[in-house]
Each structure stands twice: as C-alpha cells, then as structure tokens.
Image (tube, rainbow, N blue to C red):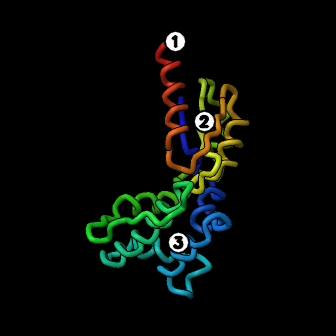
C-alpha cells in the first residue's frame, strides 16, 4: 500500500484545519476565512459554514462551501498564495461531502485508524509532505510508528504531491511492479 497526505480522521487532524491551527504558517489565509464568517462565529467558523452548507438555502451553501474550499485549497501549496476558486460556477457538492464526514469524525471513533494500524501486516509506504498544512505531518509519523511493516518517506511538499512526492511514489510503484 502506498499512501500520500496521511489523514486518519482523528479530532486533532480535523481541528488542525477547522480551527486554524495551521495559522502560524498562513495567518493571512485564516484571516481571509474569518472575513467570510460573521464575527460572532469566529470562535468556531467551520461550525457556522457547516450549518449553512447542510441547509436548504443553496446560495448560502454555495457561499460557505466556497469559503471553506478556499481555506483548504490555499494552504495546500508551499507558496501559500490565494488560489482562486471560480465562484461563478462553483458547486459545493464535494466540499459538502467532505465537511459532513469531518463533522462526524469520518464515522469512526476518535483515533480508530491510529489505534488499529498495528493489525496491518502488509508493507505500507507513507509519503508525507513535511510542510503539509491540510494533513498535519505528526499524524504520518504517529501512523508510521504503529505499522509493523511501514516506511515513512518525507518530501519537501505541502499537501499536493508536487515534483518530489510524485517521483518518490512512482519509484515505489515501479519497484513493486518489478518484484
């Protein structure tokens, strides 16, 4: 198994993005998210946006989906610049599904994957961006320590599997197909 951008659905990982714990690195992106959120909801902006995304008002769902999507997309790269998400034809369906899963902790007990990873006996390669602001790198390290046949390969990436991560994953896959 070859995995990239390790996310196990734990509450710590969900809070990392939803509560802006990454903001030490990208304060301007968190601030932009807060600007899309009424001040009285700044303590938990994602709860505000989640309620709107799941509601019946399609325009409110589109606006909140766009705000959350911009938050996530803009912390995926090392550059941290604002990647535009086109608002004119934006469909919140994908982010609605993602937010529903994270609001429900991926329908698993907290830390379920981390607490059960030791049962996996097959080789598992984890390829993790050292500077991933969507999936905190500490999770990849914790998962690696639980895997009996795991290998963790750090890349100089954010969340997106750019050049180095793609090269590493291709190399692993080529090795596996030639064995």
Residue 129 rendering spot, x and y as whole percentages: 60, 45
Q: Nearer the viewer, residue 142 or 24?
A: 24
Question: Disc 1 versus disc 3: distance between alpha carbons?
Answer: 46 Å
| Residue with the most extreme top position | 179
* 100 left or right of 41 in image: left
Q: Is residue 21 above or below residue 44?
A: above
Q: Earlier in the sequence, mark 1 or mark 2?
A: 2
Question: Disc 1 versus disc 2: distance between alpha carbons?
Answer: 19 Å
Foreground: disc 2 or disc 3: 2
Q: Nearer the viewer, residue 64 or 99?
A: 64
Which residue shows up at 66% across the image and 34% down it?
A: 152
Are there few (<14), some (14-19), or many (20+) residues within 10 Å of tag 1? few
Q: Which residue is mark 2?
A: 126
Q: Which residue is mark 3?
A: 46
Q: Is residue 101 above or below residue 57?
A: above
| C-beta proximity under 8 Å, tags 2 and 3 | no
Which residue shows up at 61% across the image and 44% down it?
A: 156
Q: Please, what secondary structure does the residue beneath circle 1 have? A: loop
Question: Disc 2 versus disc 3: distance between alpha carbons?
Answer: 29 Å
Residue 3 rendering spot, x and y as whole percentages: 54, 36
Disc number for residue 179: 1
Image quadrant assignment for residue 70? bottom left
Disc number for residue 88: none
| Residue with the most extreme right position | 145
Residue 127 rendering spot, x and y as whole percentages: 59, 37
Q: Earlier in the sequence, mark 2 or mark 3?
A: 3
| C-beta proximity under 8 Å, tags 1 and 3 | no
* 142 left or right of 69 in image: right
Q: Please, what secondary structure does the residue beneath circle 2 have? A: strand
Are there few (<14), some (14-19), or many (20+) residues within 10 Å of tag 2? many
Q: Earlier in the sequence, mark 1 or mark 3?
A: 3
């Amino acid at each position: 198994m070859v995995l990239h951008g390790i996310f196990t659905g734990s509450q710590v990982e969900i809070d990392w993005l939803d509560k802006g714990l990454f903001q030490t690195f990208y304060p301007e992106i968190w601030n932009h998210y807060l600007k899309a959120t009424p001040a009285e909801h700044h303590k938990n902006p994602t709860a505000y946006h989640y309620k709107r995304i799941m509601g019946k008002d399609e325009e409110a769902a589109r606006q909140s989906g766009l705000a959350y999507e911009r938050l996530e997309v803009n912390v995926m790269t090392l550059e941290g610049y604002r990647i535009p998400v086109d608002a004119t034809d934006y469909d919140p369906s994908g982010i609605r599904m993602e937010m529903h899963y994270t609001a429900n902790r991926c329908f698993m007990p907290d830390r379920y994957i981390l607490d059960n990873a030791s049962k996996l006996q097959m080789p598992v390669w984890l390829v993790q961006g050292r500077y991933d602001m969507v999936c905190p790198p500490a999770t990849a390290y914790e998962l690696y320590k639980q895997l009996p046949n795991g290998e963790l390969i750090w890349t100089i990436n954010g969340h997106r599997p750019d050049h180095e991560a793609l090269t590493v994953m291709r190399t692993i896959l080529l090795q596996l197909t030639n064995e």
